[in-house]
Amino acid sequence: MSDTPWLARLSPKALAVLQDLPEHAREMLRDVMDIAGRDPWSFPPFDSRDIEGEDVRGAAVGQLTAVYWINRPAGRLYVIDIVWLG
């Protein structure tokens, strides 16, 4: 794997959730996606029972969860959904 960080793109649904998040939650999401961008496989699979879904991951920290897909051919992460329990 290269040393280049994986860029993250947001789905329309995730973008709508992001707009409603408080500022500290947005900063947390940026930090979480930065960590995921350094090593996309560091967070566990979203559904560990799905052996073909290893590229769908859930990055959960505190009250925030970002569900993302690792788009290997494009070299980026795609945030499918954001859950904020705040």
Image (cartoon, rainbow, N blue to C red):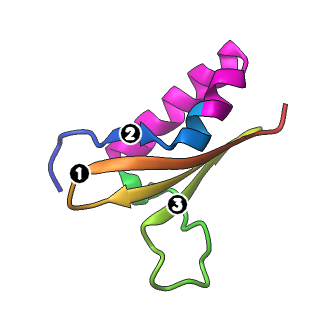
- The location of residue 52, given as percent across then percent down, is 45, 83
Query: What is the C-alpha distance between the residues marked 1 and 2?
Result: 9 Å
Q: Work out whether mark 1 precedes mark 3 in sequence or the reverse, and give the earlier one.
A: 3
Residue closest to the far right:
86
> Magenta segment range?
16-38
- The location of residue 40, given as percent across then percent down, is 39, 53
Three-letter amino acid code at the position of disc 3: Arg
Q: Work out whether mark 1 precedes mark 2 in sequence or the reverse, and give the earlier one.
A: 2
Q: Residue at x 49, y 64 (%)?
A: 56
Q: Determine whether 80 is above or below 13 in the image.
A: below
Q: Check disc 1 and report its element: helix, strand or loop.
A: loop
Three-letter amino acid code at the position of disc 1: Gly
The reply to whether the C-beta atoms of the residues labelled 1 and 2 are less than 8 Å apart is no
Residue at the spot of label 3: 57
Query: What is the C-alpha distance between the residues marked 1 and 3?
Result: 15 Å
Q: Nearer the viewer, residue 71 or 46?
A: 71
Mark in the foreground, 2 or 3: 2
Q: Nearer the viewer, residue 3 or 16?
A: 16
Q: Which mark is residue 8?
A: 2
Residue at the spot of label 1: 75
Q: Residue at x 67, y 33 (%)?
A: 17
Q: Is residue 30 magenta?
A: yes
The reply to whether the C-beta atoms of the residues labelled 1 and 3 are less than 8 Å apart is no
Relative horizontal placement of residue 35, taking residue 84 as reference (left or right): left
Q: Is residue 28 magenta?
A: yes
Residue closest to the far left:
2
- The location of residue 66, given as percent across then percent down, is 60, 46
Three-letter amino acid code at the position of disc 2: Ala
Relative horizontal placement of residue 76, taking residue 65 as reference (left or right): left
Residue closest to the far top:
23
